[in-house]
Image (cartoon, grey):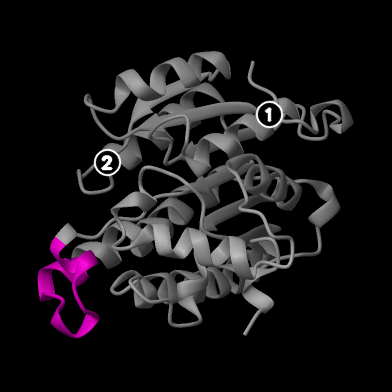
Amino acid sequence: MPETSDAPLLSKVLHGKRALVIGIANEQSIAYGCARVFRQLGADLAITYLNDKARPYVEPLAQALEARIFAPCDFSHSGELEEVFGQIEKRWGRLDIALHSVAYAPREDLRGRLVDSSDEGFKVAMDISCHSFIRMARLAEPLMTEGGTLIAMSYHGANKVVPHYNLMGPVKAALESTVRYLAYELGPKDIRVHAVSPGPLKTRAASGLKDFDVLLADATERSPIGELIDIDDVGLTTAFLATPFARRLTGTTTYVDGGLSIMA
């Protein structure tokens, strides 16, 4: 099993917990870093893959993490998310953690100015990147019978203008607002909802952003720590939010960016 450098310090604080991870595309994915730490902390995993093209990249990772459930999940395909939750209910009967790490916008809308974005492109970006988290929460709620944790991945461009982030800025802002409202609505059931906001890091998905190398260079130069984060950094923080150590935290956005977001 792949391990983080901090693995010897980790206990089995998530032993017996059941975690769904949506968004692994390859070994560079943020979702993979999260799944890896969940597993090291003792959680059983359900892992999804986007489609048949993605499956050969994701399946070996799921096998290495001993995922109990492995299923396709494309948010744009009606019924696939429901099928995943049907498998979880049948196999486990409950769910403790659900991680959403999916964002998408058509390339022409992602790379162009926000003011020039198409109606359809904006709708697609909002549906896949934001409303799908609401749909996931709706399905998770009845399975989180003993409380639980819902986590969505955001980015600093939700709160500040980041050049070249374009359409995804407003979409991620909507996602962070969604986290707050879901935290309010689901709190009485002891379901905590979080947004995690990683700094720029090298993933294949992020490489689709225009001039992404500029963002990476800027992050390294301006971060107080002076280094880029990696997927294990995100995984460790995300796992913390799912443990009892964070039992009184909900509705906020946690930055994992080496302090970049505090800089002017």
Contact between labelled residues 1 and 2, with CB atoms less than 8 Å apart: no
Identify residue for label 1: 43
Q: Residue at x 43, y 76 (%)?
A: 162
Range of the magenta residues? 108-123
Within 10 Å of the Cα at label 1, are there few (<14), some (14-19), or many (20+) other Cα atoms? many
Residue 177 visible from this viewpoint: yes
Q: Name the side, left or right, on which 233 lies relative to 124.
A: right
Position above or below: 254 against 202: below
Assign a secondary structure to mark 2: loop
Q: Position of residue 29 (x, y in %)?
A: 47, 39
Q: Name the side, left or right, on which 179 lies relative to 190.
A: left
Type of the residue with mark 2: Asp
Q: Is residue 117 magenta?
A: yes
Q: Residue at x 20, y 45 (%)?
A: 78
Q: Which is the main secondary structure of the residues drawn in magenta? A: helix
Q: Quadrant of the N terminus?
A: top right
Front position in the image: 25 or 41: 25
Q: Name the side, left or right, on which 246 lies relative to 30.
A: right
Assign a secondary structure to mark 1: loop
Q: Position of residue 72 (x, y in %)?
A: 31, 30
Position above or below: 2 against 150: above
The first of marks 2 and 1 along the sequence is 1
Within 10 Å of the Cα at label 2, are there few (<14), some (14-19), or many (20+) other Cα atoms? some
Q: CA distance from mark 2 to mark 1?
A: 24 Å
Identify residue for label 2: 74
Q: Position of residue 2 (x, y in %)?
A: 63, 20
Q: Position of residue 82 (x, y in %)?
A: 34, 40
Type of the residue with mark 1: Ala
Q: Residue at x 53, y 20 (%)?
A: 67
Q: Is residue 139 magenta?
A: no
